[in-house]
Image: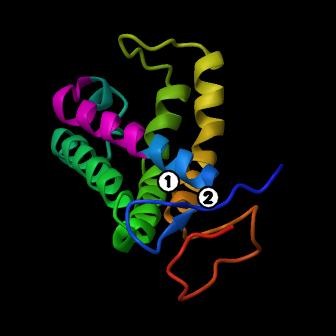
Amino acid sequence: MTSASPVKAFSKGTSVSGWQLAMLGSLVIFYCCAGLLHLYAPEPFLLITPQWVPFPRQVVEATGGCEIAGAIGLLFPRLRRISGIMLALYAVCVFPANIMHAIQDIAVPGLPQSWWYHGPRLAFQPVLVWAALFSGGAIHWPYEASPRRGSGSLQK
């Protein structure tokens, strides 16, 4: 793969590689859309919320707000790292609902009930965690062994 020159993104002095910029934009769109769905159409999410979750409707709505806040945070360099970390933690926290959805074969209108859907969805969850951390600049793998502490920039 050829190394693309870093792109100045969102503010002076913050450079983001082409891959990071594309992933960042994808995550912003994904989490904004998912957040809006959690807020305005929570019923499908309530179906897969584990019974041990207290106040399920309020939790689903709060997670929608967290998704939107995280997506917006990714747009601001000063908030990008913490937003990426928080979105990664969020993806870990909702994993039990995804597992329950698959194992209990819960019918959600508009979604397939086959393992052709559930298998890739479950397998993609760690990728989503990585994408949030990478886009936020918390990790640079596989491009660098470890992030440059204190540099404040996302460079390859």
Which image quadrant is residue 107 in? Answer: top left
Is residue 41 part of the magenta span, yes or no? yes
Name the residue: 35% across, 70% down: 79
Identify the residue position indicated by label 1 in the image: 92
Report whether 87 appears left or right of 137: left
> Is residue 85 highlighted in magenta?
no
54 vs 119: above or below: below
User: Percent x, y for residue 96?
Assistant: 47, 44
**Amino acid type of the residue that numbered disc 1 sits on in the rendered structure:** Val
Q: Is residue 80 above or below residue 38?
A: below
Q: Quadrant of the C terminus?
A: bottom right
Residue furthest right in the image: 1
| Quadrant assignment, res 4 | bottom right
Q: Tell me which segment is drawn in magenta.
A: 28-43
Q: Is 19 above or below relative to 34?
A: below
Q: Amino acid at mark 2?
A: Ser
Q: Residue 26, position in %: x, y?
A: 48, 40
User: Which numbered tag is attached to residue 17?
Assistant: 2
Tell me where residue 51 appears, x and y as whole percent: 32, 39
Horizontal arrangement in the rendering, residue 95 relative to residue 63 (left or right): right
Magenta stretch, overall SS: helix
Give neighbour class at mark 1: few <14, some 14-19, many 20+ (Cα, 10 Å). some
* 147 relative position to 93: left or right: right
For image coordinates 46% across by 75% down, the residue present is 13
**Image coords of residue 14 (percent x, y):** 47, 70
Badge 2: residue crowd in 10 Å (few <14, some 14–19, many ≥20): some
